[in-house]
Image: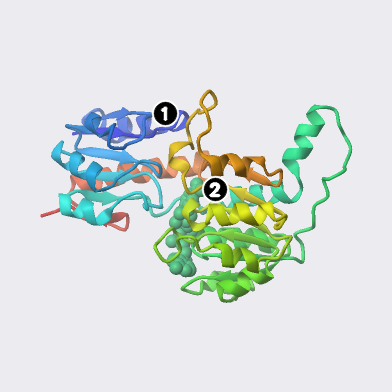
Amino acid sequence: MQIIAYGVLADERNYLESAFNEAFEGAHTLRCLELFLDKDTVPIASGYESVLTSVNDTLDAEVLGALAAGGTRLIAQRSTGYNNIDLRAAGDCGLAVSRVSYYSPESVAEFAWALALTVNRRIVRAVIRAREFDFRLDGLMGRDFHSRTAGILGTGKIGTAFARIARGFGMRLLGHDIDKNPECLALGMRYVAPEQLFAESDLISLHVPLLPETHHIVNEDALARMKDDAILVNSSRGGLVDTDALIATLRAGRLDGVGLDVYEEEAAWFHLDKSLEVMTDDALARLMTFNNVVVTSHQAFFTQDAVGQIVAATVQNVRDHLDRRSGPNTLVPARG
Ligand code: NAD
């Protein structure tokens, strides 16, 4: 079988190539591409039975139809989230779809904390100043997280890992989820409605998946409820936050700061070198101009541990497909 991987990051490539070589001993060949999958790049996948994808690939009905017509049978997504895949269209085309349902939640939770601390303690400004030998402290004052309130939206694997760290800081924990998580309750979390979480939290961290119900869950109304000096961190999916409403809030001088590892329109920018091009995304450009906003390029998952686990699970998903097995990572089973 021939396997093709889209959107492969430079540091990920070695992991993928050695894991597939080791698992299949050359019986199935893997081709790695840096290009993202979309309607322009889909012809390259013609003849490849398995296509390995990632968050910023586009798998809409048109692309999925082209893949199926080219002989693809399996889409193996190398991430937990799969909001970029039209699962119904995949099923209609006879494409099986798998994902990686579990890998180090700490990778993302620790990064969300890195953003929270970077924003709160003005680390970017401090580092830039120190480089210029400007060692004044003006404008660098932050706050203790200890004794303040962390509001965690989504208390699944990553939200719970975030809560454990928040507990270590000695924070009061508020949570919102459709299911109460016993581990979070044991940490002392109080489950409240989203409105109360937004209103009472000093630090708000988003860990729900992007679904129609959670799209723009942080909208004008939610932002208006937040404390003027709240810190907002989004390491889940860009579509959870209404970017225009966030910009209007920041322009009004509200919020202490924002850490974003994800952005609604990130597919056109993140993981790519766009440094020599004209920045045509006005909202992203505007976000970058706020000195209390830190933007990173969807890198929260990017640890040796998490990438190793993602690659191992993807190998297993391809193996399961070959053996005609479905498992906990199956989103759309193979036909027949
Ligand atoms: P998870 O499934 O363990 O947890 C998600 C939680 O959200 C669950 O407890 C679920 O009950 C809750 N939830 C679902 N719909 C909800 C709703 N409408 N209202 C309230 N709660 C709701 O998932 P996880 O592993 O913790 O991952 C969370 C998200 O993090 C993923 O969906 C993905 O979007 C994002 N993520 C980002 C990165 C990154 O690198 N930035 C990496 C991995 C995952």
- Residue labelled 2 has its Cβ within 8 Å of some atom of ligand 1: yes
In the image, residue 185 lies at what x, y percent?
Answer: 58, 74
State the residue in front, 320 or 81: 81
Tell me the amino acid under the disc marked 1. Asn
In the image, residue 20 lies at what x, y percent?
Answer: 31, 34
Tell me the amino acid under the disc marked 2. Ser
Per the image, the residue denoted by label 2 is 107
Side of 107 where 200 appears, left or right: right
Quadrant position of residue 37: top left
Residue at the limit of the structure toward the left, as seen here: 336
Per the image, the residue denoted by label 1 is 14
| Local SS, label 1 | helix
In the image, residue 318 lies at what x, y percent?
Answer: 26, 43
Q: Is residue 189 visible?
A: no
| Local SS, label 2 | helix
Q: Are marks 1 and 2 in contact (CB under 8 Å)?
A: no
Which residue is rendered at x = 58% and y = 66% of the image? 222
Side of 284 where 170 appears, left or right: right
The label number, if any, that marks residue 306 in the structure image? none
